[in-house]
Amino acid sequence: MPVITFNREYLFGLLPKGTTPESVRETSYKMGFETERITEKEVSIEITPNRPDLYSAIGFARAYKNFEHKSKRLKYELQDASPEFSITIGKEAAAVRPFIAGIVAHGISLSGEALPDLINFSEKLSETYGRSRKKIAIGLHDLSKMEPPLHYNAYEDEKYIPLNEKKERLFSDVLKGSEKGLKYGHILRGTGRYPALKDRSGVISLIPILNSERTRVTNKTKNLFVDITGMYREPVEKTADMMASIFEDMGASVRPVSIIYSGSERLTPSLEKRYLSIPLSMAESEIGISVGYNNIISLANKAGYEAALVGNEVRFRVPEYRMDVINEQDIVEDIAIAYGYDFINPLPVASSQAGSLLQAESNFETLSEEMLGMGFSEAVNTYLTNESLNFAGMRINDISSYLASEKIGCITLKNSKSASLTMMRTWLLPSLLRNLGSSVHESMPQRLFELDMAFAERRKKISEEYHLAAVSAGPKANLNEIKSVLEEISYLADMQFKARESEHGSFIKGRCAEIILHGAPIGIFGELHPEVLHNFGIEEPVCAFEINLDLMYDEEKTASSKSVRKKNSGN
């Protein structure tokens, strides 16, 4: 979770008079946040990722005062809803970074620690909630140095004077030769264009990399313009509402900006009113408390909501800065926090019997223990792979399963971002061979196993199956070694495995067999082909097996087989 560090003097100046470090620790804990440290100069608090509105000292102080019933402000509205100016969106921006919001704050005071706190807030928000500026990025500008209206588009390479510099530089040079460009330039890689915001005099920001020196914000700035850009409209516009509430708490007069898209117009921020209603009984039953209508409204105020009784329900006005409130469950959680978890008595779980492992889980656990007992180390690999590893590297030219007699389809990823992750694996052996290939420098022999899921498409239906696979690498690895391991598994599971000679591209001809149970194949074993070993960079011989455990533990067939064996043994 992000740890937010505030200037102590600035934060305590925003909190109620008489606030002490001890009360900050105690109240923060009750709010659900851990205080990391309080020094003479700083206060560091661990804030949960779902509450980005608390990343500024203004936002944290607001929530703190609400929780202590020391604030009367529970809603935020635009006093003047007429737009300050417009931002026109060019068509090329749609393919690079399509959405933008703007805020104007008149009469803002950025003296002392107010400006560092605002910059720290915008940076922290862009890094965490904004996914390192890919989802959202925020730019701060001195409105008095701008010449609206503005235009936002994706341009070819141009020149401007970047922040903290005196000479013009090309957009491409900023991406390659500045700290911010090196850190965030990957966001624009491959687009061929550079999103930028311009006024009548030229570029004021290369988005989402670096603002211009011309619109630099200082402690003397009185009128502020903020741009927020991103890939999706909702988070961009919700961020604008959140920042507008911060500016109003700072005493500024907030004005919206008209955003002109092709064929539509929007005003940001909107500070749109949003209400959710829940029955009192719902909150009480889910939390396990009895509070009554008057108390639940008081608890709502403590959590920052404006609330009122409407019929048999309590209607909550969702705070304009709360980006995390999605439905009624979020309100119930906030009410529980305001009530205090320490005052909620836990109840034992009502159950008629004690819990136990599912039979399948018990079987898998037993198999894992047996493999460990035979000297195999357990491997854990990802479900995602690629056709080269899953098929070509294993000398399989068509979409086949690990059974030579069976043909299946594979599940591919749509719009894969990486050539190494394009499909779901159909069997486990390629992953284990990759493990062996990456540890060739270790001493031999090496024995690995994995018990996990494989995926396939059979008769146009997705199949999720549990498999057990193992590999043994070393100078003495051969068919008899892996066959003895299978015999031990057969004995442990009280099943009669049989071997049937088979051919498979991954194995040496004449040294490969299918594992037969109840007359049907459930797996394969043998000595791996030298070409397969070469593909994975393995120099020692390798023997291996793979079993479909869903087929192995087919309850109906297994029960029938055991019943026959018991009858025969009795004779």
Image (spheres, rainbow, N blue to C red):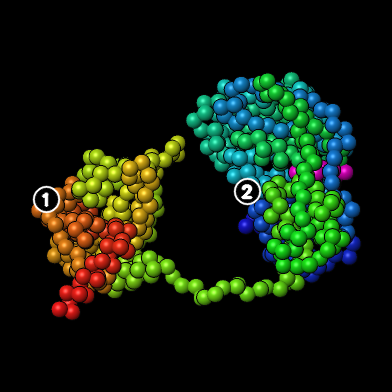
Residue at x 26% of width, y 48% of height: 401
Q: Which residue appears at 57% of the width and 29% of the height?
A: 96
Q: Name the residue carrying label 1.
A: 509
Q: Quadrant of the N terminus?
A: bottom right
Quarter placement of the C terminus: bottom left
Which numbered disc covers residue 108? Answer: none
Quick check: 163 above or below 503?
above
Q: Is residue 191 left or right of residue 108?
A: left
Does 167 sit above or below residue 291? above
What span is colored magenta in the figure? 242-251
Disc 2 is placed on an element classified as loop
Image-based side of 534 in relation to 329, left or right: left
- Which numbered marker is on residue 128? 2
What amino acid type should be assigned to the residue bearing mark 1? Lys
Q: Nearer the viewer, residue 567 or 53?
A: 567
Please tell me whether residue 246 belongs to the stretch shown in magenta. yes
